[in-house]
Amino acid sequence: MILLELNGIRKSFGATRALAGVDFQVRPGEVHALVGENGAGKSTLMNILSGMLKPDEGTMRLLGREYHPAGPLEARRQGIAHIHQELSNCPHLSVAENILLGIEPSRYGWLDWAALNRRALEILRDFHHPAIAPERRLQDLPIAARQIVEICRALAQNASLILMDEPTSSLQREDVERLFACIRRLRDSGIAIIYISHFLEEVREIADRFTVLRDGASVMSGSLQGATDAQIITAMVGRPVETLFPARRSSRTPERVLEVRRLSAPPAVREATFELYRGEVLGVAGLIGSGRTRMLRSLLGLLPANAGEIIIGKELLPAGARRAKIDALMARGIGYLSEDRKGEGLALELSVADNTTITNLASCSRWGWLNRRSQIEQTETWIQKLRIKVRSAESPVANLSGGNQQKVAIARLLHQGARIVLMDEPTRGVDIGSKAHIYEAIAEMAAAGNSVLLVSSYLPELFGICDRIAVMVRGVLSPARPVGEWTAETLMHTAIGAAAPAPGEREFLQ
Amino acid sequence: MNTPAIAAAPAISNETRKSVVGQWLRTLGPFLGLAIVITIFAIISGNPARYLSIVNLRIVLTQTVIVALGAIGMTVIIISAGIDLSVGSVIALCGVVSAIALRAGWSPWAALMAGIALGGLIGCINGLAITRLSVVPFIATLGMLGVARGLAKWAADQQTVNIPPTWLNQLAATFPAHAWMLMAPGVWITILLAIVAALLLRNSVFGRRVFALGSNEAAARACGIHTDRLKLWIYSLGGLFFGLAGVVQMSRLRQGDPTVAAGVELDVIAAVVIGGGSLSGGQGSILGSMIGALTMAFLRNGCQLIGWPNYIQEIIIGVIIVLAVAADRLRSVKQNS
């Protein structure tokens, strides 16, 4: 039996062709993974299914009947629910109001609060989450609970098909486990799920079948058991990818460029001590919330640090002092890539050229006046070098896909000439093709004698690119060890705190 | 599968307590501000008996009516993450049109309704500009601020419009004709409308969708709420209140004045913000806005009693607005950390 069938779906926005012929089928009670690079058209397709957009061409059939929703409400009525990548709920409203938003029980326009809370509780109970009180304001709940509320919103409409757009991007591992348990429960009750993700491991863990989208067209479909990772990646990027990670030989030298001693910024960062050597890539693993990002930010003076010393080369800077603020550190060769690309990593409305050169405008200005031509020319060399897909150096960064935006952020670090680069989740929300380019750029930086500190939640990249890895455990940074001494198991074991080293008994390598 | 939910429970209960305290602070904050203002002025005026006398309270309440009516409409708009800068001009225009209607021999009821309806129509036009022309509310209503002011002057032929004496003139009378009313009819009307609006925001589907819209417009749209239609209603409803405020303004002056109420929009917005409304939407309450409007009226009145000049009032009110919002920011930062 076929629940949903798409045939030849096409959609263009002006001159941009977003979808160029998508065909696939979803069966009831299956988890169907939709994979593809950023910009392949996954989100457009989801928006068409959820009634936000109308296709230009093609047919959709839901349980054999023509399906062309007039809007999101009709899609919901027909049993298709959409859970967005970024949490899409109203933080100021209660759990119950969020679950039943748009279909509130009412009488003559007046809300029936009792029925609202009762129905919401029923749904939460059916979904085995009775501990979430329907009256609670959503903004007081943790993120994982908010996601449950969104799933319950889908269930409230008796959805037969739930679209999930990268639902795990803001979750930590244990919450991912809970979400997967939810998904399996939904699947077992006969609900189909279209699951979008960048992570093949995740897709393998949860999905039964998959469809690959490339450049707006469906290029491969089938059972996950019958396809290897290499085949799927090849279909996604349109060319065989031998390995995601560049073959690199450690370029680490004994020259110490950065030393951080007993940095603390309570309560999130209790103690961080590490050394960074010329030419090395040092990974920092840890659970989300373990204090990795805060360690970087307090090191950079973006968050107040309590105590600690930063030694760059031979110069000692007390953490938190004026000399250790981010501008002073940048003048000493430190570069920073924020995990929040849209919030503080890039100025989205400004051009690629402005974003690339902003930290080093001296390179294209004289006496305070910009030389626009030089700015654009220099940017164009970075565009070529990092293979950034963009029409011109003067296009706004907002027009780029996530992966290409991230490349612009990295181009800025390179243009800045940073010798010590602190990167926070450089490949989050980035497609596989761009990931490979970013790893290449990191490897080249290190090979050129620069040093990289890489904070990442993605274990394969820590193992694929780092020389040494340290683990942040509840605000304490473990000693860094060569990557060969770690396995995924020991790393996770350390990260969850099973073998957290006490601050006094640390020993340093080298 | 009960374990995760249970495991999450302790963390939640701790947060609940924090948020309950925060919620209380948010509700009590405006009251506290009002109490402080009254206390301070009662002391520095050197004559607390006079400042807090029944007569003076009546005067303050009557002076509050126009800003308070505007603040009811503005609260709905601000909760939806919108703004309306045209309030002052709309008050003038509706007052003038209502005065012209009276002068032309319309019955007081008809003149009153004409003023209110015109306000609603202008709000509707604002809503159309915001939804159909996709102009941000700030700009759309900034344009209307000019248009409505110009129309008012045009309609009144750049003069004040004198009106025949009718019961409409009693709307904002400090001492009403019937002693049993105790306060000006306008005060009673404002209280009644404030209660209705508060109930509407709290308990109606419309009201909750206003909150949803202001809290997260994309989510509201994805849930099938017709956000454009909703905005049209919101600005039209706001306009009705501004229209009524215009008629009260006319009644107070006993004439239609096309130059009156310039800058009142800022007082109205300030009342909502002092009362806990957030310009980024999703937050605000009618009760808070009413307290905000009262706070400003007591301030003005106190300054007048002491004999401070107008410019001192302006400076003080400016500082109070910033302090009120700063206090609110501090509260929410504390809550989040």
Image (cartoon, coloured by chain):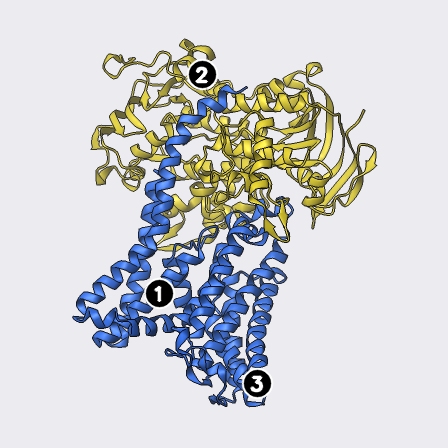
Chain colours: A yellow, B blue
Judge by depth and name the residue closer to the eye, B15 or B281.
B15
Closest to the camera, between mark 2 and mark 1, is 1
For the C terminus of chain B, the image quarter is top left
The kind of residue tagged 3 is: Ala
User: Could you say where residue A177 lies in the image, as x and y percent from the top left?
Assistant: 53, 21
Quadrant where the image shows the N terminus of chain B: top right
- Give, as a three-letter code, the residue at label 1: Leu
Say if residue A98 shows up in the picture.
no
Query: Residue A102 location in percent, x, y?
Result: 62, 46
Q: Looking at the picture, do discs 1 and 3 lie on one chain?
A: yes
Which type of secondary structure does the marked residue at label 1 adopt? helix
Q: Which residue position holds label 1?
A: B294
Q: Of the two numbered discs 1 and 3 on the same chain, state the one appearing first in sequence.
A: 3
Q: How crowded is mark 1: few (under 14 residues within 10 Å), some or many (20 or more)?
A: many
Compared across the picture, whether B144 is left or right of A220 comes to left
Which residue is denoted by mark 3 in the rendering? B101
Query: Which residue in the rendered view is the most extreme toward the top?
Result: A485
Percent across and percent down for residue A287 are: 42, 23
Name the residue tied to disc 2. Answer: A249
User: At 54% from the left edge and 27% from the top edge, which residue is drawn?
Assistant: A129
Q: Any mark on residue A411, and which?
A: none
